[in-house]
Amino acid sequence: MGADTEGITSADAKAGLIAVTDRTARQLVVLDASSRKRIASAKLATEPDYIRIVKSKNEIWVTQPSESRIEIFSLGEDRHPKHSAFIAVEGGPESLVIDDDHGRAFANTWKDETLAVDLNSRSIVSRWPNGCSGSRGLTFDPDDTRLFVGCKEGKLTVLDASSGKQLGSASSGDGVDIIAYDAKLKHAYLPGARSATMAVIAIEATGTTRVLETAHTAPGAHCVASDGQGKAFVCEPQKGRLLLFDDRALEAH
């Protein structure tokens, strides 16, 4: 990994905690969300990528793609993370989302599959073709149990999170990495680092897609986050800032 990918790489907040990975120190850090004070830390087995809190299991999951696995830490009453297990993920893992309500985690391989992992057995229970030639970002709508996969080549695919059936797809831009979804508007956001664009994609009731707009961003802008209230924040790494996109005007389209 280059120097521009080191330091803090991922964070997640849930149940009053903030969990953070430090790639440089190979460390997991747990913070109290209210006081913003550090509670504890734990050494990671190797370089981290994504981190997610699994509230139902009192666990923290950290992807480690260089070793093709997920490292799991359990949280006791003292909220100190302790290594618990590894899950082998052949060909991945890229991205990680948790569906606590249905007892599943989802991740991609680097090529053309999305995986479902059972939270209880900590095992891969399904491998689904996702329509990508290079899988990257992953997010989901828990209400409609749908997964949204970002493909590096500039495509979004929609999968049924129960069966893995592909419901729809849309193409726009190039160099897709981290994607986002606004469950209120039913809009997915697809940034392309190479094309310096971000597509706003409406997800219909059937899971089919419709590109509403393709906005200009900046070269290298490869990631986006939604506040769930119609605003999307696109990263611009070359200038160390965020680009704000207000999506509410498209709601009536």
Image (cartoon, rainbow, N blue to C red):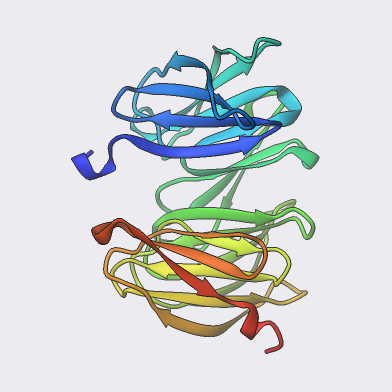
Q: Where is residue 180 in the image (x, y as percent from the top left)?
A: 55, 60
Residue 36: image quadrant is top right
Residue at 79% in and 57% down: 143
Query: Image check: 206 left or right of 196?
Result: right
Q: Where is residue 92 in the image (x, y as percent from the top left)?
A: 43, 39
208, 214: nearer the viewer: 214
Q: Where is residue 150 in the image (x, y as percent from the top left)?
A: 48, 61
Examine the rendered structure and indicate whether residue 142 appears above or below residue 245. Answer: above
Q: Quadrant of the N terminus?
A: top left
Examine the rendered structure and indicate whether residue 73 appears above or below residue 249. Answer: above
Q: Position of residue 187 (x, y in %)?
A: 63, 72
Examine the rendered structure and indicate whether residue 205 appears above or below residue 31. Answer: below
Q: Is residue 226 in view? A: yes
Residue at 74% in and 51% down: 162
Examine the rendered structure and indicate whether residue 91 appears above or below residue 209. Answer: above
Residue at 28% in and 42% down: 5
Q: Quadrant of the C terminus?
A: bottom right
Residue 77: image quadrant is top right
185, 89: nearer the viewer: 185
Residue extending farthest to the front is 35
Residue at 56% in and 75% down: 246
Query: Image check: 10 left or right of 36?
Result: left
Q: Is residue 2 in view? A: no
